[in-house]
Amino acid sequence: MSQKRNIQWLNEQKVIYRQMPINDIATIETDKYMFFENGTYEHYCLFNTKAKITTYKSLKWHYLVLYYLNQDNGLLPSYVYEFIADKENGFVTFFISDKKLNAMIDDVFATGGEPPKNKLRKVIFKDFCMLDVSEKLKIVGKLIGRKNMVDQESIYQCMLDLNELGKKITWSRVAGLLNCSTRTVQRNLNESLKNEKKLLNEEV
């Protein structure tokens, strides 16, 4: 049985692992969500779904985000990173040697501080918005599909939103959000989107 993620420990340590956009201004903002017409790279939300960290690359990205989000409060102690890397605590699916882990932490300390590379997001739901997945998907479909234009960018945004909500990505679900046929979505796909679909679905 998969070990449950011990997020409570991070909360007790007052570790920051989420950040809403701080400079980008939302095109539309309600008490439940923010919509960015041109997208934003400033939304960081770690451990928001049940998906665990499955690769060294992903683990390092999580560390860089934690470094960035917590740097104003001083450096996070090494034991926070070590706690996340311990498979028994439910954050990762693999074992990493002490040597590799220490090298990764040292590298983060040496290069961290700048905003880590992030995915472009258009629809961001606020904490405690009290919307279920179905309601969120309806809002995503309304906002992303409101121009009735199906292109690679809109498909990718729908993929990210499905992933963020913990839903497996299928072309029929993407088509439903964009209010078009599955065939229309498939006509606008490229190899990059197909590969990204596989990667995102591995996280759910």
Image (cartoon, rainbow, N blue to C red):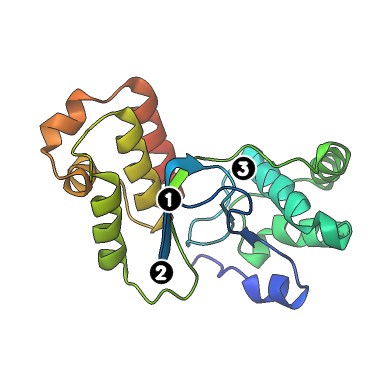
Disc 2 is placed on an element classified as loop
Q: Position of residue 115 (x, y in %)?
A: 70, 42
Q: Amino acid at mark 3?
A: Ser
Q: CA distance from mark 3 to mark 2?
A: 29 Å
Quadrant of residue 180 within the rendered picture? top left
Nearer-the-camera pick, 88 or 139: 139
Give neighbour class at mark 2: few <14, some 14-19, many 20+ (Cα, 10 Å): some
Asked if the residues shown at circle 3 and circle 2 are in contact, with their CB atoms under 8 angstroms apart, the answer is no
Q: Residues within 10 Å of mark 3 (few under 14, many from 20)?
A: few
Mark 2, mark 1: which one is toward the viewer?
Answer: 1
Marks 1 and 3: in contact by CB < 8 Å? Answer: no
Q: Residue at x 60, y 41 (%)?
A: 55
Depth check: 75 or 51 in front? 75
Q: Is residue 193 above or below residue 44?
A: above
Tag 3 residue? 58
Q: Amino acid at mark 1?
A: Thr
* 197 relative to 187, above or below: below
The tag earlier along the polypeptide, 2 or 1, is: 1
**180 and 142: which one is in front?**
142
Could you give the CA–CA distance between mark 3 and mark 1, rounded to whole angstroms?
A: 31 Å
Residue appearing at x 28%, y 59% in the figure: 139
Q: Position of residue 119 (x, y in %)?
A: 52, 40
- Looking at the image, tell me whether mark 3 or mark 2 is earlier in sequence order: 2
Please state the horizontal and vertical placement of residue 61, each as a whole percent of the image: 66, 43
Identify the element where label 1 is drawn: loop
Q: Residue at x 78, y 73 (%)?
A: 13
Query: x%, y% of residue 101?
Result: 80, 45
- Cα distance in 3D space between marks 2 and 1: 14 Å
Q: Give the residue at mark 2.
A: 32
Residue matched to label 1: 27
